[in-house]
């Protein structure tokens, strides 16, 4: 693809960053549901407790006389119900067998607390049994009433989630029927898989935001080659549900969700969209400032050695293609002779990368004596901390490539330009220069984007130190 088109690309943020602080869409309804269920359970437990104390065999005990013990009972009961995920939407809150198990478990836990705390003055057995059975009955009845009222309101069009369906034309009718089985969604729009293509996805996301879409249902056939698009939904605060799911498919951020009798893969939206990415940027800035201050003597020593070793500048500056194909100047310590870029054309026939997209040569004659040492320990990359400080790069991400390499990209390769480039990345810690095929590099970059998390970045940084010290694949 000609690089002329790259200069026309307007600056856009990193794929993983939100456009401003965005609260998860539909959060208010979810929060209201949880508060209502907790309130109903508390009322049910209080009534059950009062009935048990009134009708049970009287026994002088602080458990029946002090309000603080009732609060302890409520805390234990609600805590265990919540731990069993019985306040979640859908089939979770209607899972009555699990609800009965949770209430029974909490009753036994309270019994254990009472025995260890004050074994001589607990409530009578009749009071305990009445509370146990009435708790189960009242909580289950409360859930049933809640479901009946919710179903009635939803039939009248209230408390429904506005959703958007993206699937192939031949699948749309079947998927609409599937979504309508859940009786809590209003399908506000339908489109085919083309709306997720590179040329249309920004327009699609903007339209979904304007419509106030809470969840997007996407068929597996529509997204199987575009899993990175999940980040667009993620940072827009929109929950994405992928349907129907195949048993062999498991995206790392997904959870299973039942729609009727069919399981689908769900990638939930975060509470505050883009928060993880901004933590990453703060970490990048803090680390780059600290490292620049600590390593300043090392910078001076390397600069002196380069000057003494060969004529030419201390730093090597080169145009690289970064975020959204925008050009920027990358900084490195010079490890080659001054006219190295002019000499590359004569060396192209010796390129060791099979598909020719990247240029790698193990015994490159252009590398200086000091340059070999700097490259072996990746010390030549240290000036890129300035690029991190300027926001052009991150500590971890796909490596920014020269214009010569990007000009040979195919359309599928441009996904790696959707995130901030990095000083190190999954490619570097998975073999570095030993990888001899650009397609394998792209696969690693896509794997990084799809699986990205703060923890993954930290693991790559720690592994980078290990790889550099061992000089694995460096030349």
Image (spheres, helix red, strand yellow):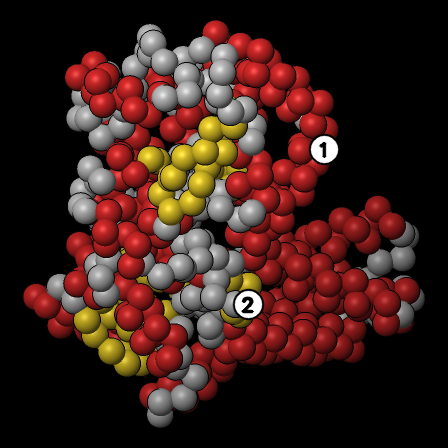
Question: Mark 1 Cα within 10 Å, few/some/many (few <14, many 20+)?
Answer: few
The percent coordinates of residue 433 (x first, y second) are: 35, 18
In this view, the residue in front, 113 or 17, is: 17
SS label for mark 2: loop
Residue at image coords 50%, 78%:
29
Task: Judge whether 156 appears above or below 458 on screen.
Answer: below
Horizontally, residue 77 falls left or right of residue 360, namely: right
The outermost residue toward the front is 311
In this view, the residue in front, 299 or 217, is: 299
The percent coordinates of residue 285 (x first, y second) are: 63, 45
The percent coordinates of residue 357 (x first, y second) are: 22, 30
The C terminus sits in image quarter: top left
Residue at image coords 27%, 46%:
414
SS label for mark 1: helix
Find residue 39 and report its image quarter: bottom right
Q: Mark 2 or 1, which is nearer the eye?
A: 1
Mark found first going from the N terminus, 2 or 1: 2
Rounded to the nearest whole Å, what is the CA distance between mark 2 and mark 1? 32 Å
Residue 110, which numbered label? none
Horizontally, residue 250 falls left or right of residue 198, namely: right
The percent coordinates of residue 333 (x first, y second) are: 52, 24
Horizontally, residue 119 falls left or right of residue 318, namely: right
Residue 21, which numbered label? 2
In this view, the residue in front, 400 or 130, is: 400
Reading the image, the residue beneath label 1 is 293
The outermost residue toward the left is 170
In this view, the residue in front, 164 or 355, is: 355
Q: How many marks?
A: 2
Residue at image coords 23%, 51%:
4
Find residue 159 and report its image quarter: bottom left
């Amino acid at each position: 693809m000609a690089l002329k088109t790259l200069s026309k690309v307007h600056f856009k943020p990193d794929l993983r960053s939100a456009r401003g602080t965005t609260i998860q869409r539909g959060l208010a309804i979810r929060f209201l549901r949880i508060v209502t269920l907790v309130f109903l359970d508390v009322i049910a437990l209080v009534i059950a407790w009062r009935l048990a104390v009134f009708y049970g065999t009287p026994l002088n005990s602080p458990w029946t006389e002090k309000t603080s013990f009732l609060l302890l009972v409520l805390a234990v009961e609600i805590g265990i119900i919540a731990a069993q995920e019985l306040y979640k939407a859908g089939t979770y809150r209607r899972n009555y067998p699990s609800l009965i198990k949770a209430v029974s478990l909490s009753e036994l836990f309270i019994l254990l607390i009472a025995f260890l705390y004050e074994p001589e003055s607990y409530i009578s057995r009749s009071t305990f049994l009445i509370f146990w059975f009435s708790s189960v009955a009242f909580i289950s009845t409360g859930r049933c009433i809640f479901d009946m009222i919710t179903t009635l309101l939803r039939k009248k069009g209230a408390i429904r989630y506005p959703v958007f369906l993206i699937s192939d034309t031949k699948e749309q009718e079947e998927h609409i029927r599937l979504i309508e089985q859940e009786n809590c969604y209003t399908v506000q729009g339908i489109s085919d898989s083309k709306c997720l293509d590179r040329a249309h996805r920004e327009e699609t996301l903007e339209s979904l935001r304007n419509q106030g879409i809470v969840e997007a249902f996407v068929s597996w056939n529509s997204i199987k080659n575009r899993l990175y698009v999940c980040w667009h939904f993620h940072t827009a605060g929109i929950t994405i549900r992928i349907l129907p799911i195949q048993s062999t498919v498991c995206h790392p951020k997904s959870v299973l969700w039942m729609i009727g009798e069919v399981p689908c893969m769900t990638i939930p939206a975060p509470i505050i969209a883009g928060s993880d990415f901004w933590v990453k940027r703060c970490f990048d800035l803090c680390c780059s400032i600290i490292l620049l201050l600590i390593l300043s003597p090392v910078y001076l020593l390397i600069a002196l050695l380069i000057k003494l070793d060969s004529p030419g500048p201390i730093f090597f500056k080169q145009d690289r293609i970064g975020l959204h194909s925008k050009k920027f100047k990358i900084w490195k310590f010079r490890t080659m002779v001054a006219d190295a870029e002019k000499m590359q054309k004569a060396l192209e026939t010796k390129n060791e990368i099979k598909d020719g997209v990247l240029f790698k040569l193990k015994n490159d004659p252009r590398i200086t004596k000091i340059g070999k040492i700097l490259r072996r320990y990746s010390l030549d990359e240290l000036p890129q901390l300035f690029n991190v400080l300027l926001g052009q790069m991150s500590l971890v991400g796909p490596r920014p490539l020269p214009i010569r390499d990007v000009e040979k990209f195919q359309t599928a390769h441009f996904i790696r330009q959707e995130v901030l480039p990095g000083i190190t990345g999954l490619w570097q810690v998975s073999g570095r220069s030993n990888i001899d095929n650009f397609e394998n590099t792209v696969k690693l970059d896509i794997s990084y984007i799809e699986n990205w998390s703060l923890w993954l970045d930290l693991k790559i940084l720690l592994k980078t130190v290990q790889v550099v010290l061992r000089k694995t694949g460096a030349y």
